[in-house]
Image: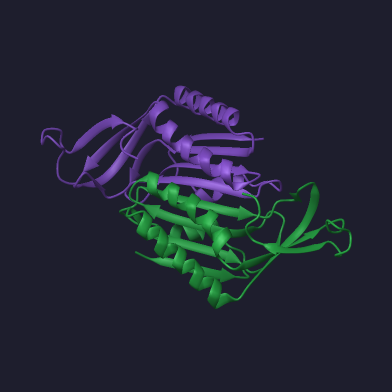
Chain colours: A purple, B green
Amino acid sequence: MKDIVKLTSDIISLDEMAKSVHDPKAGAISTFSGTTRDNFEDKEVKTLAYEAYGPMAEKSIYALITAARQRWDDLIHIAIAHKIGDCPVGETSVVIAISSGHRKQGLEAVHWMIDELKVQVPIWKKEVYVNGGPDGTDGGEVWKANNTQP
Amino acid sequence: MKDIVKLTSDIISLDEMAKSVHDPKAGAISTFSGTTRDNFEDKEVKTLAYEAYGPMAEKSIYALITAARQRWDDLIHIAIAHKIGDCPVGETSVVIAISSGHRKQGLEAVHWMIDELKVQVPIWKKEVYVNGGPDGTDGGEVWKANNTQP
């Protein structure tokens, strides 16, 4: 059983992540990709940027994987990649890929892991808006925790 | 909003399916891939084969998409591909890809759609075992409905 964790400033490939969890014993591959969308609460988003202290974020992601394996015994390989740095509209910020024997546990685990990752993993997100920030004073940039609305 | 339905004897690309639902308004892309696993109830599987009457299966998949859109209002594009014909171990038999504004609805919809697809869509599955069938009389081939265990 492989656990793959990657913090990267490169473009994240869903295909590559899904392939990294392939296994002849797997009947299911469940994935989630977070992508930068062009709007947030009626504001036009230009880009997002992510920052983290690498070793701490990686350790936190591995802890999440351990917790998932304790909850669900049918998970085979788990791969998680998170972008660090600029992530313009349409680009992938995070991918979770899980292979499992059957589909139910893999689907549940992907949903749980992205929710927990947003809450638990110390990665910070900067939103850069096209037209200024919410209070008009920050030059259109807002730093916030990663756990904004699902 | 695009609805993409494909029954195909070609290899199904998860990457292509995920890209087909990309949208600047999407913050989430959720996918499920079903793959042929090498075992079923202690028997070694050699290959699976899928058969369907195309127009009826397609109509049924479109009906499922309509039902999903009625249940969840945040879904953007929905793409579903299903393999027809031989699907050896490790190969993809079905992909569901959904983009959504936020993650919760997309993840729920993918889970619901694969469960409902297995139950509702008239696609038949033949399992070919390495060492004969379950009753030893069928030459190692078993036809069954697609809705076997999750």
Front residue of A143/B129: it is B129
In the rendering, at what x and y percent does residue A140 appear?
17, 39
On the rendered structure, is A26 left or right of A56?
A: right
Can residue B139 be seen at all in this image of the molecule?
A: yes
For the C terminus of chain A, which image quadrant? top left
In the rendering, at what x and y percent does residue A117 appear?
44, 32
Label total for image: 0
In the rendering, at what x and y percent does residue A43 appear?
19, 46
| A124 relative to B57, above or below | above
Q: Residue at x 75, y 49 (%)?
A: B39
Quarter-of-image position of residue A93: top left
Q: Which residue is drawn at 19% across and 47% down?
A: A42
On the rendered structure, is A142 left or right of B58?
A: left
| A8 relative to B87, above or below | above
Front residue of B135/B130: it is B135
- Residue lying at the far right in this picture: please name it: B136
In the rendering, at what x and y percent does residue B51 appear?
66, 70
Front residue of A3/B105: it is B105
| A22 relative to B69, above or below | above
Can residue B21 be seen at all in this image of the molecule?
A: no
On the rendered structure, is B113 left or right of B102?
A: right
For the N terminus of chain A, which image quadrant? top right
On the rendered structure, is B39 left or right of B29?
A: right
Quarter-of-image position of residue A2: top right
| A68 relative to A56, above or below | below
